[in-house]
């Protein structure tokens, strides 16, 4: 069984930064990409950034140039560095992994997520 624990969210002013982490317990196939997803109020969960084992990355247009995804395979941690945050980034952020690129199908039971709120 694989468990995902997201952390690092919080309240930040527009233009600020946050660093999210996703601790993975258990083994994930090296063929799976890992991704950060977010769910805006009233909308479906969407991929905002993903990364393959070899280091290839993908970013949605809405976060490109502001967010950076990385992974530490030795520690089993996925990161999301979020800069120049905007109010429209307000959402609950989740990590997951699965097949498919650049938007992997989430195959792991969802964690609790971490709330990011961008507001004055």
Image (cartoon, grey):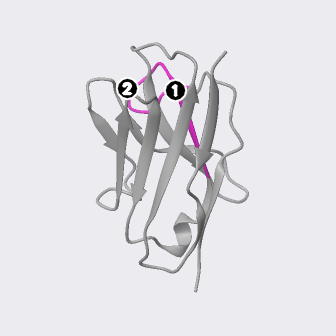
The spot of residue 82 in percent (x, y) is 41, 60
Q: What residue is drawn where x is 58% and y is 18%?
A: 26
SS class, disc 1: strand
Rendering coords of residue 93 (x, y %)? 59, 50
**Is 100 contained in the magenta span?**
yes
Residue furthest front as drawn: 75
Question: Vertically, is 47 above or below 103?
Answer: below
Q: Secondary structure at mark 2?
A: loop
Tell me the quadrant of the picture where the C terminus can be found. Answer: bottom right
Q: Is residue 56 left or right of residue 90?
A: left
Give the crowd class for mark 1: few <14, some 14-19, many >=20 residues within 10 Å. many
Q: Which quadrant holds residue 32?
A: top left
**Which of marks 2 and 1 precedes in the sequence?**
2
Q: Which disc is residue 97 wearing? A: 1
Q: Give coordinates of residue 59: x percent, y percent.
A: 36, 47
Q: Residue at x 64, y 52 (%)?
A: 114
Give the magenta-colored segment's residue range: 93-105
- Which mark is nearer the camera, 1 or 2? 2
79 w.r.t. 4: above or below: below
Give the residue at mark 2. 74
- Residue 92 vs 26, above or below: the answer is below
In the foreground, 37 or 18: 18
Residue lying at 40% horizontally and 14% vertically, measured from the top left: 30
Q: Nearer the viewer, residue 44 or 29?
A: 29
Residue nearer the viewer, 65 or 44: 65
Image location of residue 46, percent across then percent down: 56, 44
- Locate the N terminus and report the quarter of the image it occupies: top right
Instruction: Specify the label residue 71 is tagged with.
Output: none
Q: Residues within 10 Å of mark 2 (few under 14, many from 20)?
A: few
Could you tell me how many numbered marks the image carries?
2
Side of 118 where 73 appears, left or right: left
Classify residue 61 as left or right of residue 19: left
């Amino acid at each position: 069984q694989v468990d995902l624990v997201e952390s690092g969210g919080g309240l930040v002013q527009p233009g600020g930064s946050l660093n999210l982490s996703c601790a993975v317990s258990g083994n994930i196939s090296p063929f799976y990409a890992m991704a950060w997803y977010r769910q805006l109020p009233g909308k479906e969960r969407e991929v905002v950034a993903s990364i393959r084992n070899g280091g290839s990355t993908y970013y949605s247009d809405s976060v490109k140039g502001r967010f950076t995804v990385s992974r530490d395979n030795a520690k089993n941690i996925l990161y999301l560095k979020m800069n120049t945050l905007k109010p429209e980034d307000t959402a609950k952020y989740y990590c997951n992994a699965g097949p498919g690129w650049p938007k992997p199908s989430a195959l792991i039971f969802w964690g609790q997520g971490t709330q990011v709120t961008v507001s004055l």
